[in-house]
Image: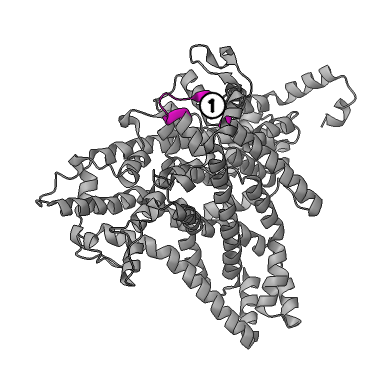
Amino acid sequence: MMADAQLGERRSIRMSRGDRVYSLFNHLFLAFALLIVLYPLVYIISSSFSSVKAVLSGHVWLWPVDLSLDGYRAVINYSKTWIGYANTLVYTVVGTGINVVLTILAAYPLSRRDMAGRGFIMFLMTFTLLFHGGLIPTYVLIQKLGIMNTRWAMLLPTALGVWNVIITRTYYQSYVPSELLEAAKIDGASDFSFVWRVVIPLSGAITAVNVLFYAVGHWNSYFPALLYLHDQNLFPLQLFLRQVLIINDIDADMMHDLDTALIDEGRLGLMELIKFAIIIVASVPVLCIYPFVQKHFIKGVMIGSLKG
Amino acid sequence: MAAPLAGRRPLAVRVRKTLAHNWQLYVLVALPLVYLVIFHYFPMYGAQLAFKKYRAALGIWGSEWIGFDHFIAFFRSFQFQRIVRNTISISAYSLVAGFPVPIILAIALNNSQTRSFKKTVQLVTYAPHFISTVVMCGMIIQFLSPSVGIVNKFIAAFGLQPVGFMGRPEWFQTIYVFSGIWQQAGYASIIFLAALASVSSELHEAAIVDGAGMLQRNWHIDLPAIMPTAIILLILNVGNLMSVGFEKVFLLQNTMNLETSEVIQTFVYKRGIAWQPPNFSYAAAVGLFNSVVNLVMLVAVNALARRVSDTSLW
């Protein structure tokens, strides 16, 4: 880090004219990238806080116009928002729990070089990344298991991520010293207690990475729900979002609580406003924690890029 | 350790010895293995559905074997050309337009010496990766809407007629590809930044002493440092040319843009699950065709990469 900063200074002192121009364009490019990503996000936030009239007449360009919470009021009064939120919370918490436990169970033995058959198990895992049976055979399997249209269909098929096992194994191999295992063995510790008392406490960082990757995956997933669930009471938030955002199917009960007597155009505008508000309501949990946990995601990608 | 000695003993003894020594490791890995067998290997076994006339009452194994009939029917159907063409053109388009962007972004970020600005750009450009597919597609539809969409407001500001982008087949793939770049380029640059961080600063110092400008250092130091990572990702991308993800295409497609938006995976879903009555075997055959082509392509591309360069997946 220090060396980097020093080098940076030296570079800027010695910058030639050509480099200064190049550096200027470099920064302009980055600023362009920043704006192009930021603008749509700001636009959605601003629209969600604007009034029906402002959204419909297209007065919102950057900042909210006629500050109003009508969109949020409609979303909050919509019963499905809460059914979806509660279900997603269950799937995310329980699903991530199952994921993390299974990942540790698989990754630790595979990190042990003295385990016979480790190469074969590794092959079984990585082969699933190259070839899969397909949508239909998996669907038939879910039917056969009798978990169609149950919460299990949201938890079991994605119980383990092979990529997560690979990064976790790589992490154990490089950060859990083999001397510790030998010392523990001499003290009479079993493999079970070694995992529980040494490996897990020592590798909080990779567990955090796994929790975050899995949790975001569960929070954002809609496809298994689309395939396996029919009962609306089991639907995760993302499926209700699909109804509102993609299929444009907004229940009347989302509208009727509003005190304003809405003419047709007002209803149309409210539908648009609701879409902006529901995007924010659904994305806020992830986007709020993201700046604080960003470094874990970066770490995950970096460990994943090591060839192990 | 007893390992070197064990090599000379008969197999049965060795197995018993390993088990006695490490049995707990096998207990630990048992549950993940059960998961793997049920949820990954059983569907592979079930893929034989593609060669059968499936009847739910008879099950996968009991249903009548009809060989390649479903495959032949698929190859002969008018859909075949269209969905294969769409699948390949969407991924090729994504690859050509999207592959260089994270590399350029990573190099630009690495060049920047304004620490706080660099951090801000990183924070913001990584963020869209965490937006769900449903929200992303909702945003796209919202932005491109002919009545209230911001894109059409800009178009109208220039005095032009609004365009109903989502209903126009000629726009679909461009929308898909560029929204993908918007969402993923920042996050995808992380892996290249990691490669750039491993470049020793002495290399840059030496180049500066020799009078190399920033552009030259980017070209002769940074780009070669990124190359191995880039080749690996390129292999993966080319190997996956026939596997366009279902999720985003499905949400963006509508009856008006099907001509350019129907891909193999959405077709499988519609025929196999959403269709009334569902045609499991036929859809499974289309899906299996897709999986096999993917596997063959990945293996072939990897072999080619190993021959022409030192970098390969395995």
Queried whether the magenta region covers residue A6, the answer comes back as: no
Q: Quadrant of the C terminus of chain A?
A: top right
Queried whether the magenta region covers residue B274, the answer comes back as: yes
Q: Is residue A93 left or right of residue B80?
A: left
Image coords of residue A164 (percent x, y): 58, 41
The residue singled out by tag 1 in the image is B282
Q: Is residue A192 left or right of residue A264?
A: right
Q: Looking at the image, which residue sits at the far bottom?
A: A17
Corner quadrant of residue B288: top right
How many labels sit on residues? 1
Q: How is the image coloured?
A: one colour
Rendered position, B204 above or below B184: below
Mark 1 belongs to which amino acid? Tyr
**Residue B71 visible in rendering:** yes
Q: Residue drawn at (36%, 50%), measured in percent from left and top?
A: B138
Q: Disc 1 on helix, strand or loop?
A: helix
Work out whether residue B171 or residue B127 is closer to the camera in this orientation and state it: B171
Q: Residue drawn at (57%, 61%), measured in percent from left and top?
A: B102
Work out whether residue B217 or residue A285 is closer to the camera in this orientation and state it: B217
Corner quadrant of residue B189: bottom right
Q: What secondary structure is the stretch in magenta mostly built from?
A: helix
What range is drawn magenta here? B272-286
Q: Quadrant of the N terminus of chain A?
A: bottom right
Q: Residues within 10 Å of mark 1 (few under 14, many from 20)?
A: many
Image coords of residue B90 (percent x, y): 54, 50
Rendered position, A48 above or below A14: above
Tell me the subunit letter for badge 1.
B
Q: Residue drawn at (35%, 40%), measured in percent from left and top?
A: A237
Q: Residue drawn at (46%, 67%), measured in percent from left and top?
A: A34
Image coords of residue B19 (percent x, y): 74, 22
Image coords of residue A158 (percent x, y): 51, 33
